[in-house]
């Protein structure tokens, strides 16, 4: 029996024909063979943190939570079962004094889901999470178990494959020595942050900022990498609870609900929020700084732009919000990443900046997202594969120089589109196209 599945943001749902929970590679092979025999498509799911339909499985849904854990460590290479959650990784690597090089701000996703959709953190010298992948093992449509490393011709397709090439069962990460971060979080005038954005993003190890619409203030976050031997000065338990639990989750949930009921209250509440949050400095182990818990549900769109275009695009969004009279309670998030050579990476071949927009999940997001997407597309933007966008294979092919090569890899490994669904049909093309 299978019930209805929903993603975290409540933007997608489906009732699969059947659900399987393999705990071994052989069980995955059997599940793929069974789906093929029964004429059903098969899709693995992770934590459901993608806002798009990339993990929607009307046929056979493979839950990979039982396929988790650390398999081996060889020097700085750590191999994990693909269903391992990001929040499990630090404890698994701690005995080896290793860490992931960079992380995003949420660690609920699985390794397979995060790398396959292009999840990233921030840092002008650090590419997305898929760039940390040294090898993958996947089960292909014909039941083969295929290991792909840097010497394989499909390496730069497979380490960010959208789930279109097969079912990931193992992922080898290139890790770094464990480290600490010195975090400085400050509210600053938005105009000044925009004027200095390129210089600050290039100078810091990790720089990002948030901007609450209807305010003139940005919350900046600057993290500096330190050796593991550096002195820790973590946030006190009370301070962390107030900032990261009470204010960022409990109070913010109430604010979002109030804003939905009485939209005119959003601008003054945003102005109050930017005065009450984001003024702290501390030093802690890297994973304790990079990630935070998000319990207020939302929908998200994020686009990768040429880094030099970020400030102009943000100013256009500000003008758009004012002109349309929208009341937006969620902040915009701005981050950066280094270029890479992964075929479907949003950072492929260029210094990249990211702008993410959000909407409370009980509000209609489409008008806001579609209008802002037009701004992003005017700057040659590339949408995050796991976040809401309205593009298709035809338009996306113009943004990725190796798009055709990825489609050829897909045709080679999954000629009958066993691993497809409606979302992949839209962004990569249907079998008949």
Image (cartoon, rainbow, N blue to C red):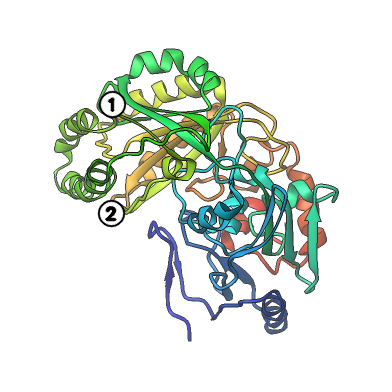
Give the x, y percent position of residue 305: 55, 29
- The vertical placement of 122 against 172, above or below, is above
| Among the two numbered marks 2 and 1 on one chain, the one whose residue lies closer to the N terminus | 1
Q: Nearer the viewer, residue 219 or 100?
A: 100
Q: Residue lying farthest bottom?
A: 1
Residue at x 46% of width, y 24% of height: 313
Give the x, y percent position of residue 351: 62, 26
Q: Secondary structure at mark 1?
A: helix
**Residue 358 image label:** none
**Left-right relation of 93 to 75:** left
Q: Nearer the viewer, residue 69 or 122?
A: 69
Give the x, y percent position of residue 18: 55, 81
Q: CA distance from mark 2 to mark 1?
A: 22 Å
Q: Which residue is mark 1?
A: 322
Q: Secondary structure at mark 2?
A: loop
**Left-right relation of 57 to 78:** left
On the question of residue 432 being in view, the answer is: no
Residue 183, quarter of picture: top left
Give the x, y percent position of residue 145: 78, 69
Q: Which residue is mark 2?
A: 362
Q: Callout 2: 10 Å neighbours few (<14), some, many (20+)? A: some
**Left-right relation of 411 to 429:** right
Q: Nearer the viewer, residue 201 or 217?
A: 201
Residue at x 52% of width, y 51% of height: 386
């Amino acid at each position: 029996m299978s019930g209805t599945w929903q993603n975290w943001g409540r933007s997608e749902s489906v009732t699969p024909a059947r659900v399987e929970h393999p705990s071994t590679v052989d069980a995955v092979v059997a599940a793929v063979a069974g789906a093929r025999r029964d004429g059903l498509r098969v899709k693995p799911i992770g934590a459901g943190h993608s806002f798009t339909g990339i993990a929607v499985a009307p046929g056979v849904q493979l839950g990979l939570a039982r396929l988790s854990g650390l398999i081996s460590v060889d020097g700085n290479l750590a191999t994990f079962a693909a269903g391992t959650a990001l929040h499990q990784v630090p404890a698994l690597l701690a005995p080896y004094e290793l860490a992931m090089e960079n992380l995003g701000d949420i660690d609920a996703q699985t390794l397979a889901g995060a790398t396959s959709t292009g999840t990233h953190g921030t840092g002008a010298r650090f590419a997305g999470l898929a760039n940390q992948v040294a090898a993958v093992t996947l089960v292909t449509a014909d039941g083969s178990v295929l290991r792909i490393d840097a010497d394989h011709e499909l390496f730069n397709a497979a380490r960010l494959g959208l789930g279109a090439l097969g079912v990931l069962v193992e992922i080898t990460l290139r890790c770094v020595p464990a480290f600490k971060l010195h975090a400085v979080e400050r509210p600053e005038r938005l105009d000044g942050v925009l004027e200095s954005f390129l210089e600050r993003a290039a100078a810091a190890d990790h720089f990002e900022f948030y901007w609450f619409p209807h305010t003139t203030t940005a919350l900046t976050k600057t993290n500096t990498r330190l050796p593991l031997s550096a002195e820790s000065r973590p946030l006190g338990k009370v301070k962390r609870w107030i900032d990261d639990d009470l204010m960022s989750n409990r109070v913010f949930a109430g604010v979002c609900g109030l804003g939905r009921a009485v939209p005119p209250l959003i601008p003054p509440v945003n102005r109050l929020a930017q005065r009450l949050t984001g003024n702290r400095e501390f030093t802690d182990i890297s994973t304790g700084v990079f990630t935070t818990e998000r319990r207020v549900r939302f929908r998200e769109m994020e686009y990768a732009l040429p880094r030099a275009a970020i400030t102009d695009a943000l100013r256009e969004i500000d003008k758009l919000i004012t002109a349309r009279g929208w009341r937006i309670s969620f902040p915009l998030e701005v981050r950066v990443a280094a270029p890479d050579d992964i075929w479907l990476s949003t950072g492929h071949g260029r210094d990249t900046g990211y702008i993410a927009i959000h909407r409370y999940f009980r509000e209609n997001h489409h008008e806001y997202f579609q209008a802002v997407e037009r701004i992003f597309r005017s700057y040659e933007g590339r949408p995050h594969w796991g976040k809401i966008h309205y593009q298709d294979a035809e338009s996306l092919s113009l943004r990725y120089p190796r798009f055709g090569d990825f489609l050829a890899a897909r045709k080679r490994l999954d000629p009958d589109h066993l691993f497809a669904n409606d979302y992949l049909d839209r962004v990569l093309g249907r079998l008949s196209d």
